[in-house]
RNA sequence: GGUCCUGUGGCCGAGUGGCUAGGCUCAGGUCUGCAAAACCUGCUACAGCGGUUCGAAUCCGCUCGGGACCUCCA
């Protein structure tokens, strides 16, 4: 398979030509959500980013195994040893079984993914479903001398590991600087070194989620699950690992250390990091209290929103920015996207009604290649969208008779829109759909005919009254040379 | 404090050592009974100051602003 996909590899800080380990196959792992509360829009952006990556790899013809985990062990709310498990805390709060909390928010997460047209991964493993494997990997790391047990917990020996392998390569951290800059966290007595991180934590009686292990009752550390689940399903070394920028350190750094510590192999060929969604320039985060849930967004029921926006408008908005850049969320930006998106959807419908000519004024093949090139250049969706708007202009111009295309070019225009708009960008034509029921169609024909008769008689009072009445029930009338069309936007 | 990223026209956002995306807004025009839609035209920006270069918004330095990570985080 010959292609020229370039991916910005976070670990080397440059764009690199993508070559899968196994020709024709791609292993893709993305850090999924911790299911202890509703996902917010920032989370959605990351999953959407990798949804497009996944879709494009499939478009290129790769057989992709896409693994996205569910973190259903809550880990600690703080860094102290007596910190509470997030899921257990929520369980107490909501008076639920921990696994009930997990199920509730997993379901919610899936609903959100569906609403935004984000495809399901091939495998969606859970942390609690892989406790045995996590224990095994911890044992391997201990066996290799890079971890030690202390008072029923197990810690990764960062200093020891760093003697042989570089720790901090991904996040650009230098171990000695970390010492001077790490805050003095409490509960460090068990660790040999303040930089060491937990692989396994001893659980006291108050912990709800705990398992038996060679080191006693406890629960796994946060980072180990991803090391285990990625390599279990994708191999000791696999192609692409994705996640949010905020996971670079410590999570991804620790993942690398764990995998290398256990197997001696670098686990990941290409690291991809999606950037943050910001609100007024600040990262959207639960702790900041500036997060929108998808529901608030759709209904517009939020103090920072003037109105609601459809999921596809939001998808379009996200894709108009590059995944590696921060994107600022605002009413104005959303509204601009909404209008543009609707215009594109309208053109998409026109696309089916174009008449062919015997010559073309526009190089459709070159235009299509630009779209492909843009995706190949580190998934540059903003360029793709700008090209699609170019296509919109062509479609409308052909419709207006200002431009002509051959039947073959019209066909290529259609297949390109199908590939990029629907398959790769994962958009759908949700707006302005006609109600296609027979009755609606017939009724509208009657009304339009009445209006046209009134117009022919210069009875504009009547024709405008009809138009306004229809507008009041969200039916929009468009007059053009070919006649009158309508869309229902309710 | 340390590490790193970033500063683009009214707004949002690509991109790049020379050919200067795109969307939204605004102004004018075509079409139209009017409107809407569509199309055409206009508004031509890269924080500031230096430097490298035939040429920089794009590379380098400094200054100023914004942000992320260093703690759970997509």
Image (cartoon, coloured by chain):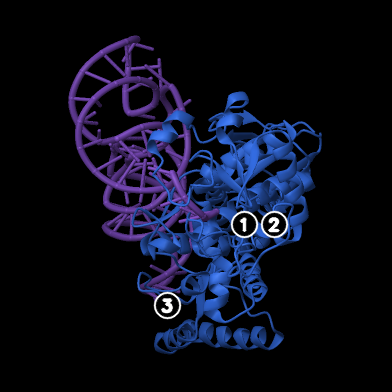
Chain colours: A blue, B purple
**Discs 1, 3: same chain:** yes
Give the answer, above or below, for where A48 lies relative to B15.
below
The residue beneath circle 1 is A202
Report the label total.
3
N-term mark: 1 or 3: 1
Report the Cα–Cα distance between label 1 and label 3.
43 Å
The residue beneath circle 3 is A301
Which residue is located at x 66 percent, y 62 percent? Answer: A353
N-term mark: 1 or 2: 1
Contact between marks 1 and 2 (CB within 8 A): the answer is yes
Read off the chain for label 3: A
Label 1: which secondary element: strand
Q: Position of residue A385 (x, y in %)?
A: 54, 49
N-term mark: 3 or 2: 2
Give the answer, above or below, for where A70 lies relative to A153.
below
Label 3: which secondary element: loop
In the picture as drawn, the residue positioned furthest to the front comes out as A151
Which residue is located at x 62 percent, y 37 percent? Answer: A257
Q: Position of residue A467 (x, y in %)?
A: 46, 83
């Amino acid at each position: 398979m010959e292609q020229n996909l370039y991916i910005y590899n976070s670990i080397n800080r440059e764009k690199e030509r993508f070559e899968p380990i196994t020709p024709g196959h791609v292993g893709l792992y993305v850090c999924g959500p911790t299911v202890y509360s509703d996902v917010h829009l920032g989370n959605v952006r990351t999953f959407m980013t990798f949804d497009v990556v996944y879709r494009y790899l499939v478009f290129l013809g790769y057989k992709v195994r896409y693994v996205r985990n569910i973190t259903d062990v809550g880990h600690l709310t703080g860094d102290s040893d007596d910190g509470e498990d997030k899921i257990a805390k929520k369980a107490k709060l909501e008076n639920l079984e921990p696994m009930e909390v997990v199920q509730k928010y997993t379901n919610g997460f899936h609903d959100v993914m569906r609403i935004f047209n984000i495809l399901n991964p091939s495998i969606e493993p859970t942390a609690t479903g892989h406790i045995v494997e996590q224990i095994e990997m911890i044992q391997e790391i201990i066996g290799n001398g890079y971890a030690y047990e202390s008072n029923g917990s197990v810690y990764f020996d960062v200093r020891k590991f760093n003697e042989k392998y570089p720790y901090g390569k991904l996040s650009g951290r230098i171990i000695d600087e970390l010492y001077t800059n790490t805050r003095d966290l409490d509960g460090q007595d068990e660790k040999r070194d303040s930089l060491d991180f937990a692989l396994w934590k001893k659980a006291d009686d108050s912990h709800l989620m705990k398992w038996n292990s060679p080191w006693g009752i406890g629960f796994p550390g946060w980072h180990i699950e991803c090391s285990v689940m990625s390599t279990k399903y994708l191999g000791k070394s696999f192609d692409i690992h994705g996640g949010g920028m905020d996971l670079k350190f410590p999570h991804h750094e620790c993942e690398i250390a764990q995998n290398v510590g256990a197997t001696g192999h670098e686990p990941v060929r290409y690291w991809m990091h999606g950037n943050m969604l910001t609100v007024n320039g600040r990262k959207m985060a639960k702790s900041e209290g500036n997060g929108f849930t998808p529901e608030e967004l759709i209904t517009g029921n939020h103090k920072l929103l003037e109105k609601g926006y459809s999921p596809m408008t939001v998808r379009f908005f996200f894709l108009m920015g590059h995944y590696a850049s921060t994107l600022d969320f605002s009413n104005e930006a959303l509204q601009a996207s909404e209008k543009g998106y609707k215009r594109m959807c309208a053109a998409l419908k026109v696309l089916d009604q174009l008449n062919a000519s015997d010559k073309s004024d526009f190089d459709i093949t070159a235009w299509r290649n630009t779209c492909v090139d843009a995706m190949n250049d580190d998934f540059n969706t903003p360029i793709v969208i700008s090209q699609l708007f170019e296509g919109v202009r062509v479609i409308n111009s052909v419709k207006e008779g200002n431009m002509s295309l051959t039947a073959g070019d019209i066909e290529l225009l259609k297949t390109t829109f199908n590939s990029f708009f629907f398959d790769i960008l994962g958009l759908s034509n949700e707006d302005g759909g006609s109600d296609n029921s027979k009755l609606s169609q017939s009724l509208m024909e009657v009304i339009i005919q009445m209006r046209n008769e009134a117009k022919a008689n210069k009875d504009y009072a009547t024709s405008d009254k009809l138009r306004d009445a229809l507008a009041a029930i969200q039916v929009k009338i468009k007059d053009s040379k070919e006649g009158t069309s309508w869309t229902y936007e309710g």
